[in-house]
Each structure stands twice: as C-alpha cells, then as structure tokens.
C-alpha cells in the first residue's frame, strides 16, 4: 500500500512526504500509567463498567477499553475474569466495611449505634448496586485470593462484633455457640433479605399499602426496632 501511495502522488511537496512518513494513528490513544497506578485504574474502570452495564457487560476487553489501555493489561494484572471480579469484590467489601464503621463511629446514642450498621449496609447497596451484587456472587469469585478473603473475613468480624455488643458478650469468630450463630444468621438474613427485595423492586406492593409518605428507610427502621410479637406454637 505504501508503494501504490507513492505512485499515485509522486513527490508533490514536502508536506506530502512528511505525512507519508508519519506513524499510523491508532483508533484510541492509550493512557500511560505507572505499573501500580494501572492496577488501580483498571479496578476503577471495572467498577464503572459494572455499575453502568451490569455483570453481563463486564469483560476484560470492556475494562481495558474503559481504562484506555491495551487489551492485555487486565490479563497481566488479574489473570482472568474471575481474578478481576475477585479483586473488585475485595474493593467492594473494603468500602462496605468502612461505610459501616464510619456510621457506627458517628452515632451518638445507643439506639443510633444499634441502627447505624444495618442502615449503612442498605445505603451502600443502594449507592453501589453492581458492586454489592458481585460481592455475594460466590460462584464467580475466588476466595483463595488473599485480598478477597481478608476483606470478607473483616466484614464477618464486624457483624459478629455488632451482635456480641447487642448480646453483651464476647463472640469468637472461629467458634460460635448455636445461639450466637442463630443471632448472627438472623440479623444477616433480615438485613440482606430486605436489601435484595429493595434493590429488586419487590417491596413496592408493601410500600403502596403503608401510610402516605412512608419511606423504605422508615420501614426498615421499624423492622429493626419492632419487638417480635405473638407466641410460638406449642
């Protein structure tokens, strides 16, 4: 092609000669990153793709395109899509844990502290539904990766500590009594279940039957504070 180009336009001017010697332009200029910064940039790009296009749209090529780097970059840093999703979930858990810890730290009354963690749990999921969803897609994650394992364990430790404070007892993360396990599972089931129903739009029917002006947050607070009523069957 370079030869035929010369035949068609033989030495018309210096401008033509310099243009023909210029390197070909690529479709998209790649963004230069320092090695460490590139990994962080890829994770940030992955989160943007996930929140915008959903899990089905999150591919290694889509992340590379979003970050403006070569298609090989995500593979070099994360190995495969499972590796990328696992590291992304680890980021999600760290931000999730930090949001709940911050909410507890700023609470000023015992009741506010008791409600702070579950409220922050729901608030994070509402603000980052894509990240929240991937954090609990166990079949897509590799929990043998240290970053994900540590972040998920920290999340469980925070839950166990919160339940221990409510029960006014020390709860070991490694060994639980049946009652302690039941208390943790009950709290997690209620908060996680409410969150999933809210994100999926499955609470709209209930919300439509409540007094005008009732918000999902108010409904959730009522769930957390209302005592269990009724009697167990004999």
Image (spheres, helix red, strand yellow):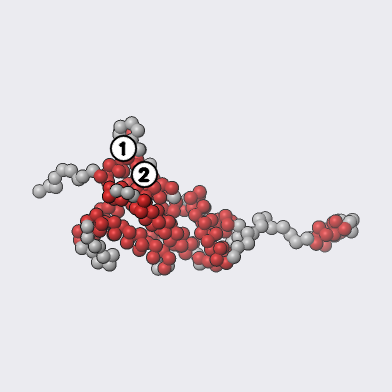
Report helix, strand or loop for mark 2: helix
Question: Which residue shows up at 52% across the image and 52% down it?
Answer: 49
Quadrant of image for the N terminus: bottom right
Please tell me in which quadrant of the rendered image residue 96 appears.
bottom left
Q: Position of residue 223 (x, y in %)?
A: 27, 44
Image coordinates for residue 19, horizontal then vertical, percent: 81, 58
Q: Earlier in the sequence, mark 1 or mark 2?
A: 2
Badge 1: residue crowd in 10 Å (few <14, some 14–19, many ≥20): few
Residue 172, can we see it? yes
Task: State the image coordinates of residue 155 (x, y, percent, origin top left).
Answer: 35, 59
**Residue at figure coordinates x 27%, y 50% from the top left:** 110
The answer to whether 4 appears left or right of 222 in the picture is right
Q: How many marks?
A: 2
Q: Residue furthest toward the left?
A: 234
Please state if 205 lies on the left or on the right of 17 as rendered: left
Q: Is residue 72 visible?
A: no
- CA gap between label 1 and label 2 equals 11 Å
- In this rendered view, identify the residue nearer to me: 50 or 174: 174
In this rendering, the answer to whether 54 lies above or below 43 is: above
Dot label at residue 198: 2
**Numbered tag placed on residue 75 in the rendering:** none
């Amino acid at each position: 092609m370079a030869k035929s180009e010369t035949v068609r336009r033989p030495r018309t001017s210096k401008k033509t000669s310099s243009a023909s010697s210029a390197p070909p332009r690529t479709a998209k200029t790649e963004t230069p990153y320092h090695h460490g910064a590139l990994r962080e940039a890829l994770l940030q790009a992955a989160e943007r793709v996930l929140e915008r296009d959903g899990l089905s749209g999150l591919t290694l090529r889509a992340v590379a395109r979003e970050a403006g780097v070569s298609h090989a970059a995500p593979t070099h840093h994360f190995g495969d899509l499972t590796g990328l999703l696992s590291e992304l979930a680890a980021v999600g858990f760290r931000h999730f844990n930090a949001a709940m810890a911050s909410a507890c730290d700023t609470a000023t009354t015992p009741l506010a502290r008791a409600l702070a963690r579950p409220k922050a749990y729901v608030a994070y999921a509402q603000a980052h539904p894509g990240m929240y969803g991937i954090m609990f897609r166990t079949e897509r994650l590799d929990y043998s990766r240290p970053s994900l394992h540590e972040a998920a364990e920290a999340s469980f430790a925070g839950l166990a500590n919160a339940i221990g404070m409510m029960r006014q007892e020390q709860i070991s993360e490694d060994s639980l009594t049946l009652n302690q396990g039941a208390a943790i599972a009950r709290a997690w089931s209620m908060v996680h279940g409410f969150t999933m129903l809210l994100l999926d739009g499955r609470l709209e029917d209930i919300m439509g039957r409540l007094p005008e002006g009732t918000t999902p947050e108010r409904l959730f607070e009522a769930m957390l504070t209302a005592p269990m009523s009724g009697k167990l069957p004999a």
